[in-house]
Image (tube, coloured by chain):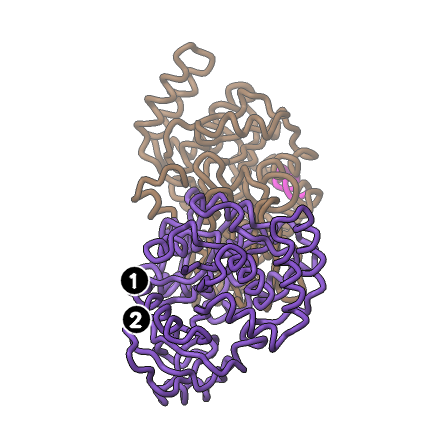
Chain colours: A brown, B purple
Amino acid sequence: MLHAVIMAGGSGTRFWPESRRLMPKQLLQLAGDSTMIQSTAARLGGTIPADRQWVLTNEVLVDAIGKQLPGVPGPQILGEPFKRDTAPCIGLAAVSIAHGDPDAILLVLPSDHVIADAAAFGRAIQAGEKLIQQDPTRIVTFGIKPTYPAESFGYIQRGDVIAGSDVDAFDVQRFREKPDRQTATEYLAGGDFYWNSGIFLWRADTILSAMKKNVPEMHARIETIGAAIGRDDFDAVLRKEFEAINGKSIDYAVMEGYPNVAVVEAPFDWDDVGSWQAIARLHPSDEHGNTVVGNHVAIDTTGCIIRTRPDHTVTTIDVDGLIIVQTEDATLVAPKHAEERVREIVKRLEADSRQELL
Amino acid sequence: MLHAVIMAGGSGTRFWPESRRLMPKQLLQLAGDSTMIQSTAARLGGTIPADRQWVLTNEVLVDAIGKQLPGVPGPQILGEPFKRDTAPCIGLAAVSIAHGDPDAILLVLPSDHVIADAAAFGRAIQAGEKLIQQDPTRIVTFGIKPTYPAESFGYIQRGDVIAGSDVDAFDVQRFREKPDRQTATEYLAGGDFYWNSGIFLWRADTILSAMKKNVPEMHARIETIGAAIGRDDFDAVLRKEFEAINGKSIDYAVMEGYPNVAVVEAPFDWDDVGSWQAIARLHPSDEHGNTVVGNHVAIDTTGCIIRTRPDHTVTTIDVDGLIIVQTEDATLVAPKHAEERVREIVKRLEADSRQELL
């Protein structure tokens, strides 16, 4: 059976002050009336119903996510007791799901992306599932056709076309880390590079075998956790083994060395909603290029991104290209080009122990 | 006896969003722990005690001012039922005070200026009082030595020195309206010009006589109001007559044509607290030239003026020269050079009937 593994452990510090430790990006309404994770679950619904959706997250977020996703069975929202990057998280999901469905195929995806066309997304998943049914050891990735020389994404270089797929699919020639501007421009011109969407499809036993080969110690601890499923000491075992794991990303632990990877060309619009400028991509702007979510009174204001609470009004005079985000206890003002530096504010608040703002 | 007439009818729209219709600038803490009007009353205290302090204001502000100035007798806080500029307001004060003290000398002063040295201020008032005792028909103004070619103040051109004054005092040669940059530069270079502080000293009967001569219809209505003092129909008479007055400023109605005006050179620092940049003059700035009243977390931020509520933090990255004022329901973001345009925001809010923000 096909299961979804929604990765919801991120902190989304670039969305501070909206995003907080206990209310990170994936739990926020950043595009539309649903939160990011609610949209993710709803988009999957037609392909993978809620009873086969699993969420992996920081243990402090389990309750909040349960409230946002009432359709997902409670035991399928798994809290990681320690932050150990994506490989242990995916391993935990794999043993948990394989425990009840040894032939499970897992769609692993972030909880905080926007994909406009759920039907196209569903077709791409089904095409990927077919590629795995053809070759159970295959790992399927989903590649986004680049539209500009992005430096903020990893890239996938495609190789030979895979015959008989319902959508465009290729063998993966190589994964590439986030490039510099020059390299990104070459990738864009080359035409055989995709942005790595961070969405993967594999059989649970395939990813566990790959982990056993590449990161055996991590795999052993994951198997120890898997063996404790249903036992009274499960929480204690999870805590002990997870803490001892040497965290690694799934890309580094498995993907980059795996010999049998396919890339499906995504037939859908995709946005990784990485920072505040995504708000401008995801909402209409006024005739002066301002994107407003909330209340704004403007005099000579152009190209700004304004977000306020419903009971607050931001007013601006003679400014251009600012991001202004107003929340109950904190307001951010920064030019768009400094949006990545929002993380520096969060680091400063951490250094100053401003827990109330984190 | 010497009485103070504190003019507190202004709206202070340049201090929006802090300043509101029911909580204008003079009722705000803009410099220090007291409100502007509390500081004004306290500064006067050593020279003119609270029981001889009178406040003229918009009738909707009478209660709020009474709470802020518990030492001032309630009947001495006079509410104007209509906005009719400064001349009727000063006339109303004059008839009200002269009713109980026909020889009253009135110090008329704004409620929203900052004067650092109360003792020097007191000495200047006493010197002015002496000039009036020498010549009861004299009107005394207080001139501030200009430190830059300000375009936002009226000017007083001095003439001959007045002998025998305790402080530098001169006959006034001429009042000048707000000049353009070029003219202001000439005034500054000329050396015989003062900024008009808007502080005046005169006998109540002197100003009433001058009004009778220059604006007889206004004077007649003011006398009608004065004749009703103590009668049951006072409020009705005040309302009827005040509404019928053709409003004029005291400068236009009396001062500019009056033949016997002296100017005392103010031996005190003075700030008219006209707009948000005054906050930078009145508070210390950090090593990056930022003036912060409230909570601010800054990354690469220079030359900003930040004001927040105690329970809110404004954060900025890579910005220079911005005014950011955060209040419960509205936030202003504008470059310093646009501070005069804050009024445009208020006008826009009025046009849009955003009563809740006015």
Q: What residue is pinned by disc 2? A: B267
Q: What residue is pinned by disc 1? A: B117
Q: Residue at x 72, y 57 (%)?
A: B240
Tell me the chain of label 2: B
The three-letter amino acid code for the residue at tag 1 is Asp
For the question of whether residue A191 can be seen, the reply is no
B309 or B321, which lies in front? B309
Residue A128 covered by magenta stretch? yes
- How many numbered markers are drawn? 2
Q: What x and y, as percent, mark residue A207?
A: 47, 33
Q: Which mark is residue B227?
A: none
User: How crowded is the residue under tag 1: few (<14 C-alpha within 10 Å), some, or many (20+)?
Assistant: few
Residue A98 covered by magenta stretch? no
Q: Residue at x 30, y 71 (%)?
A: B267
B12 or B64, which lies in front? B64
Tell me the chain of label 1: B
The three-letter amino acid code for the residue at tag 2 is Pro
Q: Earlier in the sequence, mark 2 or mark 1?
A: 1
Magenta part, dominant SS: helix
Q: Is residue A258 above or below residue B47?
A: above
For the question of whether residue B58 can be seen, the reply is yes
Q: Residue at x 51, y 45 (%)?
A: B74
Q: Which region is colored magenta?
A: A123-130
Q: What x and y, as percent, mark residue B261?
A: 44, 79
User: How crowded is the residue under tag 2: few (<14 C-alpha within 10 Å), some, or many (20+)?
Assistant: some
Q: Quadrant of the C terminus of chain A?
A: top left
Q: What x and y, as percent, mark residue B315?
A: 41, 52
| CB under 8 Å between discs 2 and 1 | yes
- Could you say whether the residue bearing mark 2 is in a helix, strand or loop? loop
- Could you say whether the residue bearing mark 1 is in a helix, strand or loop? loop
